[in-house]
Amino acid sequence: MPRFNNARDLERHLKKALDFTLATTITTTQKRLGSDAVSPVDTGRFRSSWFAAEGSASSAVAPEGTDEPNTDADSLRVDSSKTYYLTNNLPYAQAIAIEGRTNPEKNQKSKPATWFTSFRNETIPRIQAEAARQAKKEFDL
């Protein structure tokens, strides 16, 4: 474990670890939500429309025909003193994520109605714990 003689050096070290943990959490969460293993998939546009943004929620949506997960969170310069949002602004996103409505006749990879609640309540805490474990190792905490 590193030793610090100056409180400012310790503060900077801990802030880097916190920034790393937050960045890892955001990027991993976006990647998982963009996966067809997690998000219901019909055309792929829903899973491609998870956008990360700093300061305020993004209003972006993936264009029609998009079938690749969004990775804009990878380009964020995360600072733990700021606020970040991960949103899906498709008009039907709430119906799929919150209300659990999918079209099993049309959607070959339908998910249970509780898929998003389970992701939020079970998977995100595991993502956060893993990010913290990685930060602990990376920053020798």
Image (spheres, rainbow, N blue to C red):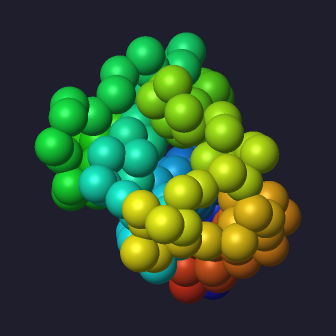
Residue 140 visible here = no
Front one among 74 and 69: 69
Residue at the (54%, 67%) spot, across then down: 104
Q: Is residue 52 above or below residue 30?
A: above
Name the residue: 61% across, 71% down: 111
Figure check: 18 above or below 114 = above
Relative to 81, 35 lies left or right: left
Front in this rendered view, residue 35 or 11? 35
Where residue 23 appears, as percent x and y from the top left, is 48, 52
Place residue 141 in its image quadrant: bottom right
Corner quadrant of residue 35: bottom left
* 84 left or right of 77 in image: right
Q: Quadrant location of residue 109?
A: bottom left
Q: In front here: 26 or 80?
A: 26
Residue 74 x %, y %: 30, 50
Q: Is residue 28 above or below residue 56?
A: below
Farthest residue toward the left? 65
Query: At x 45% / y 20%, what residue is drawn?
Result: 58
Q: Quadrant of the N terminus?
A: bottom right
| Residue 4 in sight in this render | yes
Q: Residue at 62% across / 47% down in the picture?
A: 96
- Horizontal and vertical percent for residue 42? 37, 59
* 75 relative to 55, above or below: below
